[in-house]
Amino acid sequence: MITMSKYKLSVIIPTFNTGVFLHESLGSIINQSIGFENVEVILVDDKSSDPLTLSIIDDYVSKYSNIKVIYLEENSGFPGRPRNVGIDASTSDYVIVMDHDDSYEIDAFEHLYNTITKENADMVSSNYFEEYKNIKEKHTYIFGPDFDKIKISSIDEDLRFFDIGPAIWIKLFRKSFLNEHNIRFLEGMLAEDLNFFINVLLQSNSIVYLDNYFGYNYKIRDTDEDKSTIHVRNKKYLDAMISGYYETWDMLINLNQEKYFSNVFRAHLVFWLTSFIASDISNMDKKDLAKRMGPILTEQLKYTPDFGETIYIPLVKPLKNKNFDEFVKASNNIKKSRKRRMKIKNFIHKLKI
């Protein structure tokens, strides 16, 4: 006997010491044009220690019957486990994962849901806005503003789908597809969204991308008290990324899809190198990270001799020679060079004011 869910889609929101940001996130869901009664919200709290966060969660759960909460007994430290717990607990046919400090456009769920059901797709993704210091801008187009909807039944039809990127919070998934292929987030590490997205991309036979619809507001924060993940550059973060990369490489091998190595990793390795170089961790820690990351970076050199960025050319020779002391030295020189260029740029900018 088939039982129909009372909800059209489920939203999974991991929380950890979220505080007042949760008001805006949940408010954007409550006001969705699809009708809030059609949405199941599952908060998965990753052992918050902040009384304000716990109080806000309790207020919403007590007020709305379709907002539920699951409290993890131990802090997982990474997004994967709470996301998986939420997916497993969801009761609707479609699921989407949200970050706890962002928001959706008012018609986002209606747009995504109508598309995925009409197209009978496993995943639908849209574009999104980036917000930084009260400036809201459209994220880069992949296909262009003239392409409202692009559908593929295999990644081989259009490799540009790799460039959509793993931003998981603007992707709606058919839950039965995820279950059928045992697709879940990596736990205890980062790059979990990359692994999840690539797994879907390689195993689905129906994916839709809405390049000219912007349904999500991604807040980029960069202060000492409040940093977005993209601005965290400590050893734990960089090492957790490496773990996720190796799991994703193994997945490509297991799916017999290693030919897509560069499509999957090219942009992400540039991001990792940028974060590695900008970090203030010790040279010893940098050397340890470089050694561990070495095989992945070396593999990418088969496709892009300078990682696609000429500024990284000084890293190539020490990497090939496995001379990681020189690799760290070269990375520090790149950091100094970037700082000098930034000072000059700021000086010229002041002269123009």
Image (cartoon, rainbow, N blue to C red):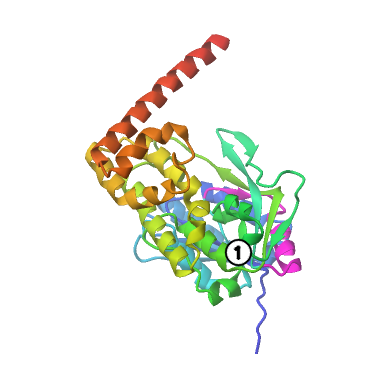
The residue located at (32%, 44%) in the rendering is 320
Quick check: is 102 in the magenta stretch? yes
The residue located at (50%, 59%) in the rendering is 259
Quick check: is 244 in the magenta stretch? no
Which residue is identified by label 1? 64
In front here: 152 or 7?
Answer: 152
* Secondary structure state at the residue bearing disc 1: loop
95 sits left or right of 120 in the view: left
- Where residue 57 appears, as percent x and y from the top left, is 50, 58
Task: Name above or below for residue 178 compared with residue 280.
Answer: below
Q: Residue furthest bottom?
A: 1
- Where residue 179 appears, as percent x and y from the top left, is 54, 75
290 sits left or right of 275 in the view: left
Please give the range of residues in magenta.
101-121
- Where residue 277 appears, as percent x and y from the top left, is 36, 36
Task: Name above or below for residue 89 compared with residue 266.
Answer: below
Please count the marks in the image: 1
**Quadrant that contains the C terminus:** top right
In front here: 54 or 302?
Answer: 302
Task: Name above or below for residue 90 compared with residue 240.
Answer: below
